[in-house]
Image (cartoon, rainbow, N blue to C red):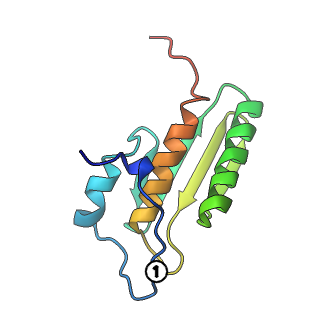
Amino acid sequence: MTPELADEPCEACTSEDEPLAEPEYESYLADVDGDVWAVVDEHHLEGTYEFEDFRDALEFTYEVGELAEEEWHHPDIHLQWGETRIEMWTHKIDGLHKTDFVMAARMDRIYDEYAPESTD
């Protein structure tokens, strides 16, 4: 059995690595929350998390920041009332790397604590 994407290591790439092409990143994209994440211009991941208030969005943003520092892989984070939007790519190769998807999966896991209650 293979581990979940969120459990895989965040491995740094080298400047000789090529950004992932669509056929390569499709399987990783399937392992992150499809309601949150999308690949934009085959260059970066963009995800939007929704919250019931500013406090939860702020606390989630803080936890994502701590994760980024721990893994030394830093996304662009946009915080506003009830929403945190994240853009992520590997700057060294100016494109997507497996680590971007590992980080997205870890953020999905953090979000599980904050997700608004479903009214279905």
Percent coordinates x, y for residue 90 in the rendering: 50, 72
Q: Amino acid at mark 1?
A: Ile
Q: Is residue 41 visible?
A: no
Residue 117 in picture, x, y percent from top left:
56, 17
Which residue is pictured at 50% across the width and 41% down the height? 108
Residue carrying label 1: 93
Q: Nearer the viewer, residue 76 or 68?
A: 68
Q: Is residue 90 above or below residue 102?
A: below
Question: Which residue occupies the extreme top position in the image?
Answer: 120
Where does residue 86 sit, x and y in percent of width and height?
58, 53
Q: Is residue 71 above or below residue 48?
A: below
Vertically, is 61 above or below 112?
Answer: below
Q: Position of residue 42 (x, y in %)?
A: 37, 67
Horizontally, is 77 left or right of 33 in the view? right
Q: How many marks?
A: 1
Measured along the vertical axis of the image, is residue 116 above or below residue 21?
above
The quarter of the picture where the C terminus appears is: top left
Which residue is drawn at the image coordinates 40% and 88% (left, top)?
A: 16
Going by the image, does 61 lie left or right of 9? right
Q: Can see residue 27?
A: yes
- At horizontal 54% and vertical 45% (from top left) the residue drawn is 107
Quarter of the picture containing the N terminus is top left
Q: Residue furthest bottom?
A: 16
Left or right, 60 with reference to 29: right
| Helix, strand or loop for disc 1 | loop
Considering depth in this image, is 20 or 44 the residue closer to the camera?
20
Most distant residue in the front direction: 1
Say which of 14 and 88 sits in front. Answer: 14
In the rendered view, does 31 fall on the left or right side of 46? left
Q: Residues within 10 Å of mark 1 (few under 14, many from 20)?
A: some
**Residue at 59% over, 29% down:** 113
